[in-house]
Image (cartoon, grey):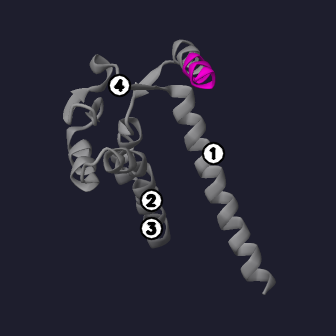
Amino acid sequence: MRLRLEAAAAAARLAVQHGVVPGGGAALLACFPGLEALAGTDEEALGLRILAQALAEPMRALAQNAGFEPEPIVHEAACRGRGWAFDVLSGAWVDAHSAGLVDPLAVTLAALDASVSAAALALSADVLVRHMT
């Protein structure tokens, strides 16, 4: 219990210091239009589709863990645009900031950075293993 309170206090401090973004995965889904605007080779397009799928995964997981079908929720979130989030407790779409459904920006950026670093490491290791064999 004490550890949970300390984590909540740390998240609150980060939110005050660096700001907040819409929670429930909505901030990551807000990146979709920027990804769609990027054009490139077939390999780059594949990478962008993989990234888009990964950015939707937190919302998918939240919806599924709450007993909702995730795909319609992710689709609706992408259609609604920035600032909207699906409140899994009420089962309704809400303005994230008004409903208090927010995440600290610093936490979201740290998670995104860690994910990209892990993916880059996995790709690098795969390339090294293929070149060594």
Q: What kind of residue is marked 1?
A: Ala
Q: Do tag 3 and tag 2 residues touch (Cβ < 8 Å)?
A: yes
Q: Quadrant of residue 98?
A: top left
- Mark 3 to mark 1: distance in Å? 21 Å
Could you classify mark 4 by the number of other residues whose Cα lies within 10 Å: few (under 14), some (14-19), or many (20 or more)? many
Label 4: which residue? 101
Label 2: which residue? 48
Along the viewing direction, whichever of 1 and 87 lies nearer the viewer: 1
Residue 27 is situated, as x and y percent measured from the top left of the image, at: 39, 35
Task: Give the mark nearest the N terminus, 4 or 2.
Answer: 2
Label 3: which residue? 46
**In the displayed structure image, the side of residue 18 where residue 42 appears, left or right:** left
Residue 92 visible in the snapshot: yes
Residue in the picture at 58% in, 14% down: 13
For discs 4 and 3, the disc positioned in front in the rendered view: 4
Image: 70 above or below 6: below
For discs 4 and 2, the disc positioned in front in the rendered view: 4
For discs 4 and 1, the disc positioned in front in the rendered view: 4
- Mark 4 to mark 3: distance in Å? 32 Å
Label 1: which residue? 114
Numbered range of the magenta stretch: 1-9
Q: Do tag 2 and tag 1 residues touch (Cβ < 8 Å)?
A: no
Residue 39 is situated, as x and y percent measured from the top left of the image, at: 40, 59
Q: Of helix, strand and loop, which one carries label 4? A: loop
Task: Give the mark nearest the N terminus, 4 or 1.
Answer: 4
Along the viewing direction, whichever of 103 and 47 lies nearer the viewer: 103
